[in-house]
Amino acid sequence: MQEPQSGWRPVLDVDDPEAATAAIRRSMPAASVESDRPDFRFHAEQYRDERLDLTRWGFRARVDGGRSTETSGVTLVVPGGGVYEWTGGDERGDQDAPFVMRHGVGYHGRSEDMHLTIVRLEQTRFDDLAAAIRGDDPRPVRFAQSLPPTREGAEHLARTVALQAAVLESRAAGSSALVAASVYRLLVVGLLESVPTEGADDRERTCRRRMLATVDRACRYIDDHAALPITVADIARHVGTSEPGLRRAFGFWRSRAPEAELERARLAGAHRDLLAAEPGDDGLIDTIAARWGHASPRRFATRYRAVYTVGPEDTLRAE
């Protein structure tokens, strides 16, 4: 991973409407800027790394944003102060809420005396992280609407972008690849949680079926190999997923961790051996417990009793 740039880079700070218009038109080719105000001012700064591009505009002017149609990447616009009105397809909004520019939709905006943050996320990296977060669905993310459907979602997105901007302003934090990756993940999670995506129901059903198949394969492997010194990493590797992916699948379908499933299988194996054993050997219970991976006879007895309601010695004595 490349180390990100440290802090924001000034791009432009002018009282020249022509220079401001040229800068704005690089993002909105048809933009027009009011040029007859004596207090006219335009300021732009930027942060960029391999995952995202953040641009902040501040202007004392009236700007007609023209039309912009997104064709690649994920673009989030966060108005801040002043007056801002926009339309995109059958949606419209104002300065009170951030919005996502959807692919193939034309947007038109009018603003006056305001600050604006534009966040552009590289599509492939966004999709890769989204797949890992949502359960390994490889399909590209497409948002079903521009606006978060709830006030809480809008506020969460705005706060997340503000946090990211503040972190990147810090020389120490902004130059840390680990910190940059962490705040980037927060932003991706915020987008996925706050704005509906296309095919979300189909993706969820597919993801659930895939997780169920993962759990079924993992349980068969655990049952067949519980007497061996296997680990969660071994189980995940066998079924073709990551450890976090395996834990998500078990959490969804079994409401427990894979370690708990492995312990269940080992207790069941010990239970079968106790039922089949002949009583008489004082060390037999400890031997069976150790055979199934239980180093502490006392802990084994406690866990066994919690599952089978009797102690291992009772099972051994049963006829």
Image (tube, rainbow, N blue to C red):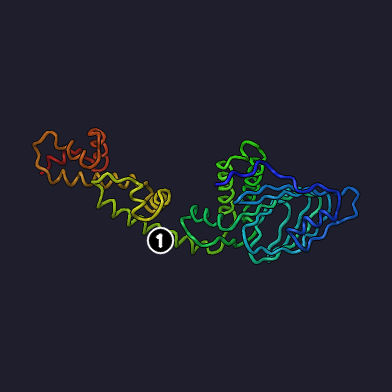
> Which residue is at the front of the view, 14 or 66?
14
Residue beneath the point at 40% across and 57% down: 211
- Residue 285, image x and y in percent? 17, 37
Q: Position of residue 221 (x, y in %)?
A: 29, 53
Residue tagged 1: 209
Q: Quadrant of residue 305?
A: top left
Quarter placement of the C terminus: top left
Q: Quadrant of residue 318?
A: top left
| Camera-side residue of 225 and 111 | 225
Helix, strand or loop for disc 1 = helix
Q: Measuring 27% from the left and 44% from the top, which residue is drawn there?
A: 229
Give residue 315's position: percent from left, percent from top.
16, 41
Residue 264, x across and y down, in percent: 28, 46
In this rendering, the answer to whether 229 lies above or below 99 is: above
Is 147 situated left or right of 14 in this image? Answer: left
Mark 1 Cα-neighbour bin, 10 Å: few <14, some 14–19, many ≥20: few
In the picture as drawn, the residue positioned furthest to the front comes out as 2
**Foreground residue, 8 or 268?**
8
Amino acid at pointer 1: Arg
What number of labels is visible?
Answer: 1
Q: Is residue 26 above or below residue 272?
A: below
Identify the residue shown where x is 62% and y is 62%. Answer: 72
Q: Nearer the viewer, residue 35 or 259?
A: 35
The residue located at (59%, 62%) in the rendering is 144
